[in-house]
Amino acid sequence: MKHIHSYYSPNDLYNRIIEGLNEMGKDLSKITLDDLKPVDEFHIRSDTATKELIKLSRVTPEMHILDVGCGLGGAARRLSHETGCRVTGIDLSDEYIDAAERLTQLFDLQERVKFHAASALALPIDENTFDGALSIQMNMNVEDKLGWLKEVYRVLKPGGRAVLYELCGNKNTPVYFPVPWAQDSSMSFLVPPESFRDVITSAGFDIDVWNDKTDLARKAFADMTEPVGEPNLPELGTHLLVGNDILTKAYNLRRNLDEERVSLIETVAIKRNS
Ligand SMILES: C[S@@+](CC[C@H](N)C(=O)[O-])C[C@H]1O[C@@H](n2cnc3c(N)ncnc32)[C@H](O)[C@@H]1O
Protein backbone atom coordinates (compact mmCIF):
# COMPACT_ATOMS: atom_id res chain seq x y z
CA MET A 1 0.00 0.00 0.00
CA LYS A 2 3.07 2.25 0.44
CA HIS A 3 3.46 2.94 -3.29
CA ILE A 4 -0.24 3.90 -3.52
CA HIS A 5 0.24 6.29 -0.58
CA SER A 6 3.25 7.90 -2.26
CA TYR A 7 1.41 8.18 -5.59
CA TYR A 8 -1.19 10.36 -3.84
CA SER A 9 1.36 12.44 -1.86
CA PRO A 10 2.23 15.65 -3.68
CA ASN A 11 4.30 18.25 -1.80
CA ASP A 12 2.78 21.39 -0.36
CA LEU A 13 -0.59 20.69 -1.97
CA TYR A 14 -2.71 23.26 -0.13
CA ASN A 15 -0.37 26.14 -0.97
CA ARG A 16 -0.19 25.08 -4.61
CA ILE A 17 -3.99 25.12 -4.80
CA ILE A 18 -4.09 28.58 -3.23
CA GLU A 19 -1.44 29.75 -5.72
CA GLY A 20 -3.60 28.40 -8.56
CA LEU A 21 -6.66 30.22 -7.26
CA ASN A 22 -4.64 33.46 -6.94
CA GLU A 23 -3.34 33.09 -10.50
CA MET A 24 -6.96 32.71 -11.66
CA GLY A 25 -7.76 35.98 -9.88
CA LYS A 26 -10.11 34.37 -7.31
CA ASP A 27 -10.85 36.24 -4.11
CA LEU A 28 -10.42 33.65 -1.33
CA SER A 29 -13.03 35.33 0.86
CA LYS A 30 -15.66 34.80 -1.87
CA ILE A 31 -14.63 31.40 -3.10
CA THR A 32 -17.37 28.92 -4.16
CA LEU A 33 -17.44 25.12 -4.24
CA ASP A 34 -17.45 25.33 -8.04
CA ASP A 35 -14.19 27.32 -8.04
CA LEU A 36 -12.43 24.29 -6.57
CA LYS A 37 -14.04 21.56 -8.67
CA PRO A 38 -11.20 21.33 -11.24
CA VAL A 39 -9.04 19.94 -8.42
CA ASP A 40 -11.26 18.64 -5.60
CA GLU A 41 -13.77 16.52 -7.54
CA PHE A 42 -11.23 13.96 -8.74
CA HIS A 43 -13.57 11.57 -10.52
CA ILE A 44 -15.24 11.13 -13.88
CA ARG A 45 -17.93 13.78 -14.58
CA SER A 46 -16.85 15.84 -11.57
CA ASP A 47 -19.62 17.73 -9.73
CA THR A 48 -22.30 16.51 -12.18
CA ALA A 49 -21.71 12.97 -10.92
CA THR A 50 -21.52 14.13 -7.29
CA LYS A 51 -24.93 15.80 -7.57
CA GLU A 52 -26.42 12.57 -8.98
CA LEU A 53 -24.87 10.61 -6.11
CA ILE A 54 -26.26 13.08 -3.55
CA LYS A 55 -29.76 12.46 -4.94
CA LEU A 56 -29.27 8.70 -4.68
CA SER A 57 -27.98 9.00 -1.11
CA ARG A 58 -31.34 10.32 0.24
CA VAL A 59 -29.38 12.19 2.91
CA THR A 60 -31.28 14.40 5.36
CA PRO A 61 -29.84 17.19 7.58
CA GLU A 62 -29.63 15.17 10.82
CA MET A 63 -27.54 12.41 9.20
CA HIS A 64 -23.82 11.74 9.60
CA ILE A 65 -22.20 10.35 6.44
CA LEU A 66 -18.81 8.69 5.91
CA ASP A 67 -16.86 9.43 2.70
CA VAL A 68 -14.31 6.64 2.21
CA GLY A 69 -11.34 7.67 0.04
CA CYS A 70 -12.52 11.28 0.13
CA GLY A 71 -9.45 12.83 -1.53
CA LEU A 72 -9.54 16.62 -1.08
CA GLY A 73 -13.11 16.44 0.20
CA GLY A 74 -14.91 18.15 -2.69
CA ALA A 75 -17.82 15.70 -2.63
CA ALA A 76 -17.95 15.74 1.20
CA ARG A 77 -18.25 19.54 1.26
CA ARG A 78 -20.84 19.53 -1.54
CA LEU A 79 -22.90 16.85 0.22
CA SER A 80 -22.92 18.83 3.47
CA HIS A 81 -23.53 22.14 1.70
CA GLU A 82 -26.52 20.76 -0.23
CA THR A 83 -28.16 18.73 2.54
CA GLY A 84 -26.96 20.23 5.83
CA CYS A 85 -25.68 16.84 7.02
CA ARG A 86 -22.40 16.11 8.82
CA VAL A 87 -19.70 14.31 6.84
CA THR A 88 -16.52 12.58 7.93
CA GLY A 89 -14.01 11.91 5.18
CA ILE A 90 -11.15 9.44 5.45
CA ASP A 91 -8.29 8.99 3.00
CA LEU A 92 -4.96 7.19 2.83
CA SER A 93 -3.11 10.37 1.85
CA ASP A 94 -2.06 12.66 4.73
CA GLU A 95 -1.29 15.39 2.21
CA TYR A 96 -4.82 15.23 0.76
CA ILE A 97 -6.34 15.21 4.25
CA ASP A 98 -4.31 18.26 5.27
CA ALA A 99 -5.51 20.12 2.16
CA ALA A 100 -9.10 18.86 2.70
CA GLU A 101 -9.18 20.31 6.24
CA ARG A 102 -7.73 23.65 5.23
CA LEU A 103 -9.97 24.01 2.15
CA THR A 104 -13.01 23.24 4.32
CA GLN A 105 -12.10 26.17 6.59
CA LEU A 106 -12.33 28.50 3.58
CA PHE A 107 -16.06 27.66 3.48
CA ASP A 108 -16.50 27.70 7.25
CA LEU A 109 -17.77 24.12 7.07
CA GLN A 110 -15.24 22.66 9.55
CA GLU A 111 -17.84 22.03 12.27
CA ARG A 112 -19.89 19.81 9.94
CA VAL A 113 -17.20 18.33 7.66
CA LYS A 114 -14.20 16.61 9.25
CA PHE A 115 -11.34 14.52 7.91
CA HIS A 116 -8.95 11.84 9.12
CA ALA A 117 -6.03 10.04 7.49
CA ALA A 118 -6.84 6.31 7.59
CA SER A 119 -7.04 3.24 5.41
CA ALA A 120 -10.39 2.05 4.08
CA LEU A 121 -9.30 -1.42 5.21
CA ALA A 122 -9.05 -0.48 8.89
CA LEU A 123 -11.50 2.29 9.67
CA PRO A 124 -10.80 3.80 13.11
CA ILE A 125 -14.55 3.92 13.75
CA ASP A 126 -16.97 1.98 15.98
CA GLU A 127 -19.59 -0.27 14.43
CA ASN A 128 -23.07 1.14 13.66
CA THR A 129 -21.82 4.76 13.66
CA PHE A 130 -22.84 6.27 10.33
CA ASP A 131 -26.26 6.84 8.75
CA GLY A 132 -24.84 6.49 5.25
CA ALA A 133 -21.61 6.15 3.29
CA LEU A 134 -20.10 7.35 0.07
CA SER A 135 -17.11 6.06 -1.86
CA ILE A 136 -16.08 7.71 -5.10
CA GLN A 137 -13.51 6.12 -7.38
CA MET A 138 -11.28 4.56 -4.78
CA ASN A 139 -11.80 0.80 -5.26
CA MET A 140 -9.35 0.75 -8.19
CA ASN A 141 -6.50 1.06 -5.67
CA VAL A 142 -7.89 -1.54 -3.26
CA GLU A 143 -7.01 -5.18 -3.84
CA ASP A 144 -8.98 -6.47 -0.83
CA LYS A 145 -12.42 -5.26 -1.96
CA LEU A 146 -14.24 -7.57 0.44
CA GLY A 147 -12.18 -6.17 3.35
CA TRP A 148 -13.06 -2.58 2.34
CA LEU A 149 -16.78 -3.29 1.92
CA LYS A 150 -16.97 -5.27 5.17
CA GLU A 151 -15.50 -2.23 6.92
CA VAL A 152 -18.13 0.05 5.36
CA TYR A 153 -20.83 -2.44 6.36
CA ARG A 154 -19.52 -2.64 9.93
CA VAL A 155 -19.55 1.13 10.55
CA LEU A 156 -22.98 1.73 8.94
CA LYS A 157 -26.15 1.66 11.03
CA PRO A 158 -28.73 -0.94 9.94
CA GLY A 159 -30.72 0.47 7.02
CA GLY A 160 -27.78 2.73 6.02
CA ARG A 161 -27.16 3.35 2.31
CA ALA A 162 -23.68 3.06 0.80
CA VAL A 163 -23.44 5.01 -2.44
CA LEU A 164 -20.56 3.79 -4.58
CA TYR A 165 -19.32 5.33 -7.85
CA GLU A 166 -16.57 3.05 -8.99
CA LEU A 167 -14.47 2.04 -11.96
CA CYS A 168 -14.46 -1.64 -12.88
CA GLY A 169 -12.82 -3.74 -15.54
CA ASN A 170 -14.66 -4.66 -18.72
CA LYS A 171 -14.64 -7.35 -21.44
CA ASN A 172 -11.10 -6.71 -22.62
CA THR A 173 -7.69 -6.71 -20.95
CA PRO A 174 -5.11 -5.45 -20.24
CA VAL A 175 -5.64 -1.85 -19.19
CA TYR A 176 -3.36 0.81 -20.76
CA PHE A 177 -1.18 2.59 -18.18
CA PRO A 178 -0.60 5.14 -16.78
CA VAL A 179 -4.16 6.12 -15.80
CA PRO A 180 -5.29 8.83 -13.34
CA TRP A 181 -5.36 6.36 -10.41
CA ALA A 182 -2.20 4.38 -11.18
CA GLN A 183 1.20 4.73 -12.75
CA ASP A 184 1.30 1.01 -13.54
CA SER A 185 -0.47 -2.29 -12.95
CA SER A 186 1.01 -2.74 -9.46
CA MET A 187 -1.40 -0.08 -8.13
CA SER A 188 -4.58 -1.00 -10.00
CA PHE A 189 -7.03 -3.75 -9.07
CA LEU A 190 -10.02 -3.63 -11.41
CA VAL A 191 -12.57 -6.43 -11.39
CA PRO A 192 -15.46 -6.90 -13.85
CA PRO A 193 -18.80 -5.34 -12.79
CA GLU A 194 -20.32 -8.78 -12.05
CA SER A 195 -17.51 -9.58 -9.61
CA PHE A 196 -17.85 -6.14 -8.02
CA ARG A 197 -21.56 -6.80 -7.52
CA ASP A 198 -20.82 -10.22 -5.98
CA VAL A 199 -18.31 -8.79 -3.52
CA ILE A 200 -20.81 -6.10 -2.41
CA THR A 201 -23.40 -8.77 -1.61
CA SER A 202 -20.76 -11.01 0.00
CA ALA A 203 -20.02 -8.16 2.43
CA GLY A 204 -23.67 -8.40 3.52
CA PHE A 205 -25.30 -5.61 1.49
CA ASP A 206 -28.50 -5.69 -0.56
CA ILE A 207 -28.19 -3.89 -3.86
CA ASP A 208 -30.87 -1.22 -4.30
CA VAL A 209 -29.57 0.66 -7.38
CA TRP A 210 -27.20 -0.52 -10.13
CA ASN A 211 -26.47 1.89 -12.99
CA ASP A 212 -23.88 1.40 -15.71
CA LYS A 213 -22.43 4.86 -16.38
CA THR A 214 -19.78 3.77 -18.90
CA ASP A 215 -21.40 5.53 -21.87
CA LEU A 216 -21.50 8.82 -19.97
CA ALA A 217 -17.85 8.33 -18.99
CA ARG A 218 -16.97 7.75 -22.66
CA LYS A 219 -18.73 10.95 -23.65
CA ALA A 220 -16.91 12.88 -20.92
CA PHE A 221 -13.51 11.74 -22.26
CA ALA A 222 -14.35 11.79 -25.99
CA ASP A 223 -12.23 14.89 -26.66
CA MET A 224 -9.06 13.58 -25.03
CA THR A 225 -6.38 13.27 -27.72
CA GLU A 226 -2.86 11.91 -27.40
CA PRO A 227 -0.76 14.72 -25.89
CA VAL A 228 2.29 15.92 -27.82
CA GLY A 229 5.12 18.11 -26.52
CA GLU A 230 5.07 20.03 -23.26
CA PRO A 231 1.66 19.80 -21.57
CA ASN A 232 -0.35 23.01 -21.40
CA LEU A 233 -1.84 22.64 -17.92
CA PRO A 234 -4.37 24.95 -16.24
CA GLU A 235 -3.65 26.85 -12.99
CA LEU A 236 -5.89 24.43 -11.09
CA GLY A 237 -6.32 20.80 -12.02
CA THR A 238 -5.75 17.20 -11.04
CA HIS A 239 -2.12 17.41 -12.25
CA LEU A 240 -1.51 18.98 -8.80
CA LEU A 241 -2.70 15.67 -7.29
CA VAL A 242 -1.06 13.02 -9.48
CA GLY A 243 1.56 14.69 -11.69
CA ASN A 244 2.10 16.52 -14.96
CA ASP A 245 1.50 13.40 -17.05
CA ILE A 246 -2.23 13.78 -16.31
CA LEU A 247 -3.06 14.36 -20.00
CA THR A 248 -1.47 11.03 -20.96
CA LYS A 249 -3.38 9.41 -18.09
CA ALA A 250 -6.67 10.94 -19.23
CA TYR A 251 -5.99 9.91 -22.84
CA ASN A 252 -5.33 6.32 -21.71
CA LEU A 253 -8.54 6.36 -19.69
CA ARG A 254 -10.38 7.36 -22.86
CA ARG A 255 -8.80 4.43 -24.76
CA ASN A 256 -9.64 2.06 -21.92
CA LEU A 257 -13.28 3.19 -21.94
CA ASP A 258 -13.58 3.14 -25.75
CA GLU A 259 -12.01 -0.31 -26.07
CA GLU A 260 -14.15 -1.84 -23.30
CA ARG A 261 -11.25 -2.34 -20.91
CA VAL A 262 -12.78 -0.18 -18.16
CA SER A 263 -16.40 0.43 -17.08
CA LEU A 264 -18.05 2.81 -14.61
CA ILE A 265 -20.69 1.68 -12.12
CA GLU A 266 -22.93 3.73 -9.82
CA THR A 267 -24.61 1.65 -7.15
CA VAL A 268 -26.46 1.96 -3.87
CA ALA A 269 -26.04 -0.90 -1.39
CA ILE A 270 -28.09 -1.13 1.78
CA LYS A 271 -27.15 -2.67 5.11
CA ARG A 272 -30.07 -4.90 5.99
CA ASN A 273 -32.05 -4.14 9.14
CA SER A 274 -31.18 -7.07 11.36
C1 LIG B 1 -9.17 8.97 -7.74
S1 LIG B 1 -9.00 9.54 -6.11
C2 LIG B 1 -10.70 9.98 -5.71
C3 LIG B 1 -10.77 10.92 -4.55
C4 LIG B 1 -12.16 11.42 -4.17
N1 LIG B 1 -13.06 10.34 -3.83
C5 LIG B 1 -12.75 12.27 -5.26
O1 LIG B 1 -13.65 11.79 -5.95
O2 LIG B 1 -12.29 13.42 -5.45
C6 LIG B 1 -8.75 8.03 -5.16
C7 LIG B 1 -8.54 8.30 -3.69
O3 LIG B 1 -8.57 7.04 -3.00
C8 LIG B 1 -7.63 7.14 -1.93
N2 LIG B 1 -7.28 5.77 -1.53
C9 LIG B 1 -6.67 4.80 -2.26
N3 LIG B 1 -6.54 3.67 -1.53
C10 LIG B 1 -7.09 3.93 -0.32
C11 LIG B 1 -7.26 3.16 0.87
N4 LIG B 1 -6.85 1.88 0.97
N5 LIG B 1 -7.86 3.75 1.93
C12 LIG B 1 -8.28 5.04 1.88
N6 LIG B 1 -8.13 5.82 0.78
C13 LIG B 1 -7.55 5.27 -0.31
C14 LIG B 1 -6.48 7.93 -2.52
O4 LIG B 1 -5.61 8.46 -1.55
C15 LIG B 1 -7.24 8.97 -3.34
O5 LIG B 1 -7.51 10.11 -2.57
Image (tube, rainbow, N blue to C red):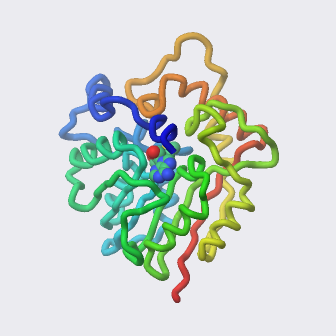
**Residue at the spot 60% in from the left edge and 64% down from the top edge:** 146
**Residue at the spot 41% in from the left edge and 70% down from the top edge:** 59
Q: Quadrant of residue 173?
A: top right
Task: Report the number of numbered marks.
Answer: 0
Q: Is residue 195 above or below residue 72?
A: below
Residue 148, x across and y down, in percent: 54, 61
In this rendering, would 124 be left or right of 272? left
Observer-nearest of 125 and 75? 125
Residue 199, x across and y down, in percent: 66, 66
Residue extending farthest to the bottom is 274
- Note whether residue 46 is visible: no
Residue 215, x across and y down, in percent: 70, 48
Observer-nearest of 110 and 156? 156
**Residue at the spot 49% in from the left edge and 17% down from the top edge:** 232
Residue extending farthest to the front is 2
Q: Is residue 161 above or below residue 248?
A: below
- Note whether residue 97 is visible: yes
Q: Is residue 137 above or below residue 266?
A: above
Q: Quadrant of residue 218?
A: top right
Residue 8, x across and y down, in percent: 45, 38
Q: Quadrant of residue 202?
A: bottom right
Observer-nearest of 126 and 206? 126
**Residue at the spot 57% in from the left edge and 68% down from the top edge:** 268
Residue extending farthest to the right is 171
